[in-house]
Amino acid sequence: MSGSSNAEEPILDATSAGTVTFGEWQTWYRITGDLESGVAPVVVAHGGPGATHDYVLTIADIARSRRPVIHYDQIGNGRSTHLRDRGADFWTVDLFLDELDNLLDGLGISDAYHLLGQSWGGMLGAEHAIRQPSGLRSLTLSDSPASMPLWLNAAAELRSQLPPDVQQTLTQQLPRFLAHVHPTRQVPERALLLVSAVSLILGLFFVGQVGLLSSLVNFGALFSFLMLHVSVVVYFVVKNRARTFGLHLLSPLIGFAIIAYVLVNADVHAKIGGLVWLGIGVVILIGLQLAGRSTVLSLEAS
């Protein structure tokens, strides 16, 4: 008896794979099907930024209809060149648009192709399409927002329909009153006003003790910078295996040592007050984790 027609077929193997030089780097690609078939191929742009082609690989099944399918890993991800030492200003939309154009040219398909973008890939595809490339035959957007403000508003509306306890889990790392974000200025105005009021009260309370108040403020600021130096080492050297030891290891260690020396020699009352405040924060953090609540700050847009 023949097998069921509904049985899942395995994903087609790649016909070929390789890299295209993009500036100083390499963009990895995978082709399923024959680019010489005379049928315009489908180029698949994955989501992220920061994901890879793997989760949209089932789209390769389109090649069963004789239409070639091209997957690629955007630069910084997967099998393409990783650039762990590049800052946020490097990762621009234009960078990914230029990479896509370079891939199309490198594979010799820029005169006729279809583009399918999923999530962020669809946003990239839309930006590509408004340039009106002559070879683009069609654009398919899958789960991609056309406008992030509209998407955020729609997501907030859907979230408001969830049960109250679920909403609280999602949004209430700050109390609802403090989590409010001003619709125009996009800042947590109520939280800012509360902090200002508390600061004013403390300032009046410490009249005549400006030195102690200054020491308390400096202790908090310096301790934050101390943790910042630690986070640089953890993020770049430990997690991302960066080899820029002078920048991401030696410099933070020197900064850490200097700030630690200043903190050790700070006013004793400032150290006591600062450590007590730090202890309160640690207790709250542990309590949130034990309660199964996220410790990532979430602000609620109105």
Image: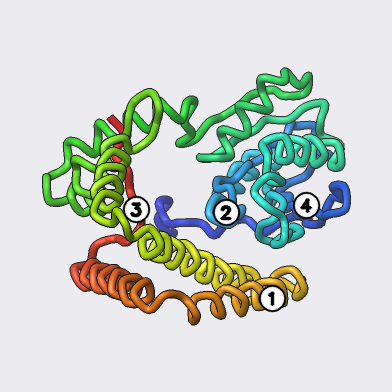
Residue at the spot of label 4: 27
Whichever of labels 4 and 3 marks the residue nearer the N terminus, that label is 4
Q: Which mark is residue 273?
A: none
Mark positioned earlier in the residue sequence (4 or 2): 4
Quadrant housing residue 115: top right
Q: Are marks 1 and 4 in contact (CB under 8 Å)?
A: no
Above or below residue 51? Residue 42 is: above
Q: Tell me if residue 1 can be seen.
A: no
Contact between labelled residues 3 and 2, with CB atoms less than 8 Å apart: no
Mark 2, residue position: 51
Q: Residues within 10 Å of mark 2 (few under 14, many from 20)?
A: some
Q: Earlier in the sequence, mark 3 or mark 1?
A: 1
Q: Residues within 10 Å of mark 3 (few under 14, many from 20)?
A: few
Label 1 crowd bin: few (<14), some (14–19), many (20+), radius 10 Å: many
Question: 37 or 43, which lies in front?
Answer: 43
Which of the two residues, 232 or 125, is positioned nearer the viewer here? 232
Give amino acid for label 1.
Answer: Leu
Q: Are marks 2 and 1 in contact (CB under 8 Å)?
A: no
Give the distance between the C-alpha atoms of the residues marked 2 and 3, in whole angstroms. 23 Å
Task: Write down the residue under mark 1.
Answer: 249
